[in-house]
Amino acid sequence: MRSAILFIFGVLLGAGAWNSSAIADVLPEDADGWHSWQVDEPGASTEMCCFTWRNKERPNKGCNLDGRSIAFSNSGDCSAAPGTIQVYVRLGAGIPQDIVVLSSNCPVSTETTVTDHGLLSATENLRWFRSVIEDRQLDNDVREEALFALVNSSSEVAYAYLDKLLTSR
């Protein structure tokens, strides 16, 4: 019994260390504002784009990520070749505030600069998302955004992880 408790404690300690290093591997701890990267996985794709609503009209010209009147759609002219998804994350005090996965052809704007982290492997991308999804100290809305974004990536690595999550419960 005592060895089982020690084992569980060790796993939890290791998981906490893994989570914090995974975030730091992709995004520096003091990196506030919008960040973006593409995922290098040939099968990953999305046609998802966001649009800013103005006077109940949806222009097909992308969106302002800082805006609150945005809608998401997978119909329009934002489709891109498989393997070209774009991840957007807004950090505040080093903590994820907003997470969006869009087609790399979806035009976006922000009131601030978006720091581009280039191309990440599917494994690095999943590792970052896992660190958010599995961090129970984060706001549930952010964790849900991470799950939604991971599903939108249509990544095989992401689906394998989601399948594991669903079957382990």
Image: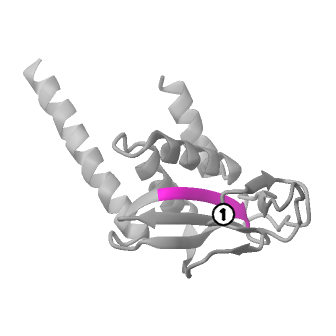
Q: Residue 118 at what x, y percent from top left? A: 57, 79
Query: Among all residues in the image, which is located at the extreme front?
Result: 55
Residue under the point 75% across and 59% down: 45
- Above or below residue 131? Residue 36 is below
Residue under the point 57% across and 61% down: 122
Q: Give the prevailing secondary structure in the magenta stretch.
A: strand
Identified by mark 1, the residue type is Gly
Q: Quadrant of residue 78?
A: bottom right
Residue under the point 82% across and 53% down: 73
Front-lying residue, 49 or 152? 49
Q: What segment carries the magenta color?
A: 97-103
- Name the colouring of the figure: one colour
Residue with the mark numbered 1: 67
Front-lying residue, 113 or 75? 113
Q: Residue 30 at what x, y percent from top left? A: 33, 72
Front-lying residue, 121 or 48? 48
Q: Is residue 30 magenta?
A: no
Q: Residue 1 at what x, y percent from top left? A: 12, 17
Residue under the point 79% across and 62% down: 51
Residue count near mark 1 (Cα–Cα under 10 Å), binned few <14, some 14–19, many ≥20: few
Q: Is residue 96 left or right of residue 78?
A: left
Q: Is residue 32 left or right of residue 67?
A: left
Q: Quadrant of residue 11?
A: top left
Q: Is residue 100 magenta?
A: yes
Element under label 1?
Answer: loop
Q: How many marks?
A: 1
- Above or below residue 25? Residue 16 is above
Q: Residue 40 at what x, y percent from top left? A: 63, 68
Query: Among all residues in the image, which is located at the extreme top?
Result: 1
